[in-house]
Image (cartoon, grey):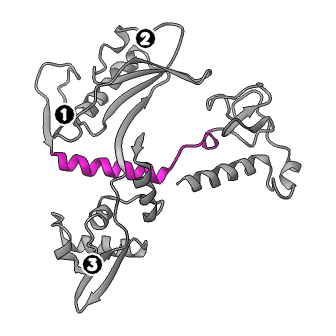
Amino acid sequence: MIECDPDELGERAAFGQERLDGDLLDVVRYAPAEWAYYREALPDPGYPWRYVRESIHRADDRGILETRRRGNRIEIRRRFSYPDWVERIVAIENKPDLDASAARALSDQLERDVAMGLADEVWIAIEADDDRVSAALFEDVPVEAGIVEVDSTALTADVAWYPRTLAVDRPGTRILERPDGGAHDASAAQFEYVEASEKRERRLEIAERAYERGWRSYVDTMRPDCRHFEGRTDGQLLPYCRAKGRQPTARECAGSCPAFEPEPPTWRTRGWPIEGGPGARIKQILADRRERRR
């Protein structure tokens, strides 16, 4: 999950919906406001300049950078100033069926995430049940990781353990190899330090990938092509299942649902405003709404 500054996020839209990879970020972030030879304007990349030229041409093709030739020299000028739009990154491991065995298996990855410190917070999301979370269940989970219990039926969540804020602006530790005894083996593990500058680059690349994916929509996981599915407005357009008489969860609203019935073919032959069927229309409405918010 990416927490953003709304105004800066709006300025990020000028660079298009596709993500900017590390090479493009190195170009657009340091491109000058006035024309300049690219080798004098950009910092030394640490790899051959021919790859930088390739990135410059890709940025030019996408319309996010201006280029011109002066003799044999390529000059560049920025079209937009790349904003500082990312405020916080929250990593959430979604484990609805987590048990003691799965918690032990997950602990190694969580230890690595915490040691690296790329995210501001690390969480585990589990399915809530009648019993409170057992301390023994999470004895192998790092204390820095938060735990939240989600009731997917009632659409509520309770925090069982609050996370610690990680030092994203300080060097991190990359665990390369653990001893055979696992995450809590007392023998030495191989690791290396990661500079804060490298972490900043990685965080921005993660945010760019999330930006490209966009906002998640229930239409991506549910079945609006079911005859029992409809959208109801309660401040926002929400899914409703006539067969169940309530708002369904993403897990329930699937092709495997016993009540699932595809829309009759005749529904899909109607004209405007539900051309292609109600399910297709709901998808289009939400896609248009999501595009406007981007």
**Mark 1 or mark 3: whose residue is earlier in sequence:** 3
What is the magenta segment's predominant secondary structure? Answer: helix
**Mark 3 or mark 2: whose residue is earlier in sequence:** 3
Q: Nearer the viewer, residue 8 or 283?
A: 8
Looking at the picture, how far across and down is residue 267, in whole percent? 86, 48
Q: Which residue is mark 2?
A: 133
Q: Nearer the viewer, residue 131 or 189?
A: 131
Q: Helix, strand, or loop for circle 2?
A: loop
Looking at the picture, how far across and down is residue 120, in whole percent? 30, 36
Is mark 1 in CB contact (under 8 Å) with mark 3? no
Q: Is residue 135 above or below residue 282?
A: above
Q: Nearer the viewer, residue 286 or 57?
A: 286
Region in magenta: 195-221
- Relative to 213, is 26 on the left or the right? left
Give the label, 3 or 2, closer to the camera: 3
Q: Helix, strand, or loop for circle 1?
A: strand
Looking at the picture, how far across and down is residue 67, in whole percent? 33, 81
Q: Which residue is mark 1?
A: 177
Give the label, 2 or 1, closer to the camera: 2
- Relative to 44, is 265 on the left or the right? right
